[in-house]
Every structure is written in C-alpha cells, then in structure tokens.
Image: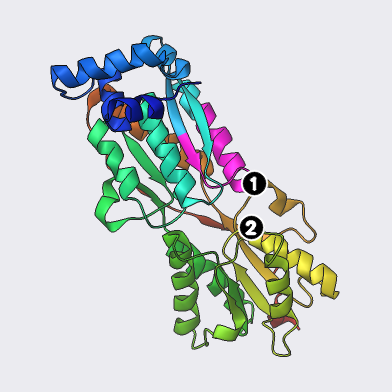
Amino acid sequence: MVTIKDVAKKCGYSVCTVSRALSGKGYLKEETKQKILETVAELGYRPNTLAVNLKTGRRQALALVLPSLTNIYYTKLEQYLEACAAEKGYIIYLNNTEYSLEKEKQILENLIGMDIAGVIITPVTSQHDHIMNLAKYDIPYVYLNRSFEDDMEHCLRLDNKKAAYEAVSYMIKLGHKNIGGIFQSFDNLTYRDRYDGMAQALKEHGLDCRPSHMLFDINPEDMGTTPGRILQLLQKPDRPEAIFACNDMTAFNIYRACYILGLRIPDHMSVFGYDDCIMANFVTPPLSTVSIPVRKLAGTAIDFIHGYLESGVRAELPILKASLIIRNSVRNLNLD
C-alpha cells in the first residue's frame, strides 16, 4: 500500500508539505502543489479514508495518543474520552506509543498526514517539541495530566504535588515515620511532581526522605525487572513500613511482592496508591489511593478541542483537583 511517506520521498518534499497540498491548508506555490498532485496520481496514493470521510461528513476524528493500553487507568480514560467525544459528534482514533518516544514521534507525523481534526495526548517523556509542531498545521491539541512551562496553554493538569502531599501526610497522621516511595521515570514530570509532594510532606513533619527507601525509573508493566527491584526493597533489614506508590499499577506490584514474601497488608506493610483504577477496590485489602477525576479530565479535554474547532478561540484550561480515597491498605499505628 502506498503511503504519504512514499509520496513525499518520490517528489522530494516533506510529509507535512504533502499533507498541506492534499488538504488545502496553508500556502504552497502552485508548482509545488502541482508536482505533489502529479506524484499522487503516478503512485496511486489514496489519502486515509477514515480522515477524508469524517472530514466531509458530520463527524470528525480526534486522535488519542496514550503510552499504554494495558494500564487500567488509561483504559478507563479512553472510555470516558470516547463517550464525551461522541456527545460532540466526534469519534476517537486510538494510538498506543508503548512508552516509546520514537513511536510517539512517528504517530504524530502520521497524524499530520491524515489531516486529523485534533490530538489528545499523554506524552511519554518531557520532550514535546514534536507535539508543539501540530500548531503549524492549525491542529488543536491538549496534553492530559502533563505540565510543560513553555506550552502551558495546552496543558490540562492535576495538582499532583498537592495530592501526593496529602496522601503521605495521611500516612504520617496514622503514625508512620519510615515511609518509602516508588516512582516511574522523572522524564514524565507528573511523577516528579508526585515525588516532590511526598518529599514536602516528609520534610514538614521532620522526617527523612531516605534514598535507600526509594525506587526510581520503575515501569510497572515490565514484568522482567520491576518485581525483582521491589522484592529487593522489601527484603532490606531496615525496609520501610509504608510505601507511597506513584500509581495503582505500581501499588499492585507491591501487593504481589508482599504476597511472595509473606508480608500482610496492612499489618506488615502499608501501601498508598494513585489513580483509583477499578481494581483498587477489588484487591485484598482494598487499596487506599488518590482518585483522579477521569470523567472531568476527559470532558474538559474534548470541550477544549471542540471549542477551538468551532470558534478558533483557545479556552483557558483549569488545574483539576484529585481527592483521597481511604480504604484498608494503611495501618493505623496510633491504635497499637
């Protein structure tokens, strides 16, 4: 099948230039446009039928770019986005980067070639120049739960630092002093914010943030190395008595490690998660966690894109608030 890349290579122009020639967006010299159209005819290239049909019909496609489809949180997010998009007359075109920056860049390049109506994305890392490039083609976009100082007007954020601060403060209130933390890569600024919230809570209560009780660069979906690293942490003679996990998937890995080691939650180990995915209420014991307002996150993202497409005006994005969901995974040491 001939792709837009084949056309670009054949005629000597970029994928973006070919896309502009086919969509009619932006200025191109007549000879440039003519050469591209001749190459399209020569190669028999057919633009993506999904995008073309939607563009000329009543509905349009919004691209959703997520780092994972196995993480339960992202599955829930996709479902809400799909429902909110349908209410506005859009459908969701789902893309999975599998935590790969290169794949993310490739997907975005392809989306420009498809003349997609808008992009909703949770980036893999803090690199985002390739995402900001969408503005050159008048494609509205919004980052989900990400914060970039040079592109804040497109960031739909949670107050991750405050939520993590409140979660760790809750554990301290129940008498815990020896608290560890497990975090994914700080290339994702969301996890940096959650770590900062934890560190602030410990500092304000006069407690140490001990490096030996921290794990960083964890991938909770990596069944090769993640379980072993958590097991090593829990087997230390001076292991933490409570752990703040950067998300629920990481918390479930802690549950598994505790089961292997014969540690009972919360009797021997207290755990606090983040996301409040559906499984948090079904594990034993039910997981105390930070609840993200996923429905509001999805609805706000769709409204942002839709508003721009309808009026050309970019609305101001709010900072959404998370809340603590207290269940049974944190022991109250004050009762001992």
Mark linked to residue 222: none
Question: What is the number of callouts on the image?
Answer: 2
Q: Could you tell me residue 9's position as x and y percent?
A: 34, 30
Q: Is residue 48 shown above or below 252?
A: above
State the residue position of label 2: 248
Asked if one can make out residue 194 in the rendered structure from this viewpoint, the answer is yes
Q: In this view, does 76 lie to the left or right of 151?
A: right
Secondary structure at badge 1 equals helix
| Residue holding disc 1 | 72
**Placement of the C terminus among the 4 image quadrants:** bottom right
C-alpha distance separating marks 2 and 1: 9 Å
> Residue 170 versus residue 109: which sits nearer the camera?
109
Give the crowd class for mark 2: few <14, some 14-19, many >=20 residues within 10 Å. Answer: many
Camera-side residue of 122 and 167: 122
Which residue is painted at 62% across and 52% down in the image? 276
Where 184 falls versus 111 (above or below)? below
The residue drawn where x is 40% and y is 27% is 6
Q: Residues within 10 Å of mark 1 (few under 14, many from 20)?
A: some
Range of the magenta residues? 64-83
Q: To which quarter of the image does residue 190 belong?
A: bottom left
- In the depicted view, which residue is nearer to us: 238 or 224? 224
